[in-house]
């Protein structure tokens, strides 16, 4: 069995930590849980568990914010090579963890996770977008079929117009569906990779040629750190791999994407367009 070290990025949701640790303890491969606390006022001191290592990480958080997740210095005491990186509001099911580990054992120099995105000339949650367009395609097909029936049995100008509209709608939906880009990002907040991959990717992120991206992430208090990590990762390795599966969402309040969702998406779109796309 491949033993896994879970490394949890914590900030201001201490109530999630109790729940998360309990869930992680039920996953059979996890024999170590590192919790990186980004705020001293929200450290959870109630957990006494041999598996759990509490790391005071708030000084680093003040300097590089969410990028502390990738700082290899935080992994010096981690005993396993297989790393499950987690936000404090996500936990994989046993089946998802099994599938990610199975892929890891075939190729440990890769990044695996269930949440995929596209970051380039635009920023897209491609799975969500593809799902929406697929639903619209099904609706368009049903509507077109109904209009064909009406046109066949009740041919007149009105049924002809409705048929034309439904046909155009179908063509537009197919066009939009085909234009959805393939993912090139796996969100690290629920992912598995090797400790060496994190080390080499962190080194790549700190190169002088990427300093403008590094500084932009710091300027925005860590927002975009996951996109930057994937950008640097792809400089060294193959495309990350999406492993679909179920996972638990805990309390997601007080996060970038929940407190200012519009600003969050606007920043990520501009970040991909202005900083990531030129280097692709």
Image (cartoon, rainbow, N blue to C red):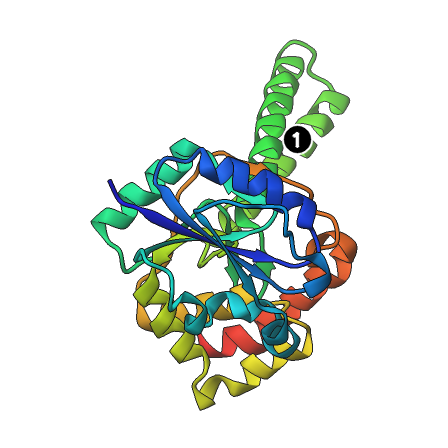
* 108 with respect to 192 (left or right): left
Give the vertical position of 162 relative to 90 (above or below): above
In the rendered picture of this protein, how many numbered marks are placed on residues?
Answer: 1
Q: Farthest residue toward the bottom?
A: 208
Visible in this render: residue 226?
A: yes
The answer to which image quadrant residue 261 occupies is bottom right
Front position in the image: 143 or 99: 99
Q: Quadrant of the N terminus?
A: top left
Q: Farthest residue toward the top?
A: 153
Give the vertical position of 160 relative to 55 (above or below): above
Visible in this render: residue 120?
A: no
Percent of width and height locating residue 275? 56, 77
Percent of width and height locating residue 50? 44, 47
Mark 1: few/some/many CA within 10 Å (<14, 14-19, 20+):
many
Residue displayed at 68% across by 64% down: 39
Q: Farthest residue toward the left?
A: 106
Front position in the image: 252 or 39: 39
* 259 with respect to 176 (left or right): right
Percent of width and height locating residue 155? 69, 16
Front position in the image: 10 or 252: 10
Q: Quadrant of the C terminus?
A: bottom left
Percent of width and height locating residue 84? 42, 51
Q: Secondary structure at mark 1?
A: helix
Give the vertical position of 55 relative to 33 (above or below): below
Residue displayed at 69% across by 60% down: 265
Residue under numbered circle 1 = 166
Front position in the image: 123 or 164: 123
Give the vertical position of 145 relative to 49 (above or below): above
């Amino acid at each position: 069995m491949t033993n896994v070290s879970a490394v949890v990025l914590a900030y201001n949701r201490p109530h999630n930590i109790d729940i998360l640790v309990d869930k992680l303890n039920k996953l059979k491969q996890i024999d170590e849980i590192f919790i990186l606390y980004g705020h001293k006022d929200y450290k959870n001191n109630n957990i006494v568990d041999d598996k759990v290592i509490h790391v005071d990480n708030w000084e680093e958080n003040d300097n590089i914010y969410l990028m502390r997740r990738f700082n290899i210095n935080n992994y010096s005491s981690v005993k396993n090579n297989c790393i499950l990186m987690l936000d404090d509001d996500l936990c994989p099911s046993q089946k998802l963890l099994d599938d990610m580990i199975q892929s890891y054992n075939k190729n440990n120099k890769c990044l695996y996770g269930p949440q995929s995105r596209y970051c380039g000339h635009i920023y897209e949650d491609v799975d969500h977008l593809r799902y929406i367009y697929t639903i619209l395609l099904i609706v368009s097909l049903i509507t077109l079929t109904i209009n064909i029936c009406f046109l066949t049995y009740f041919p007149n100008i009105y049924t002809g117009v409705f048929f034309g509209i439904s046909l155009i709608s179908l063509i537009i939906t197919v066009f939009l569906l085909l234009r959805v880009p393939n993912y090139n990002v796996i969100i690290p907040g629920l992912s598995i990779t090797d400790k060496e991959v994190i080390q080499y990717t962190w080194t790549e992120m700190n190169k002088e040629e990427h300093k403008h991206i590094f500084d932009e992430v710091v300027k925005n208090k860590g927002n975009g750190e996951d996109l930057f990590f994937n950008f640097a990762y792809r400089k060294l390795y193959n495309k990350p791999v999406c492993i679909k599966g179920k996972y638990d969402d805990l309390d997601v309040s007080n996060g970038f994407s929940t407190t200012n969702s519009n600003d969050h998406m606007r920043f990520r779109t501009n970040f991909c367009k202005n900083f990531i796309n030129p280097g692709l």
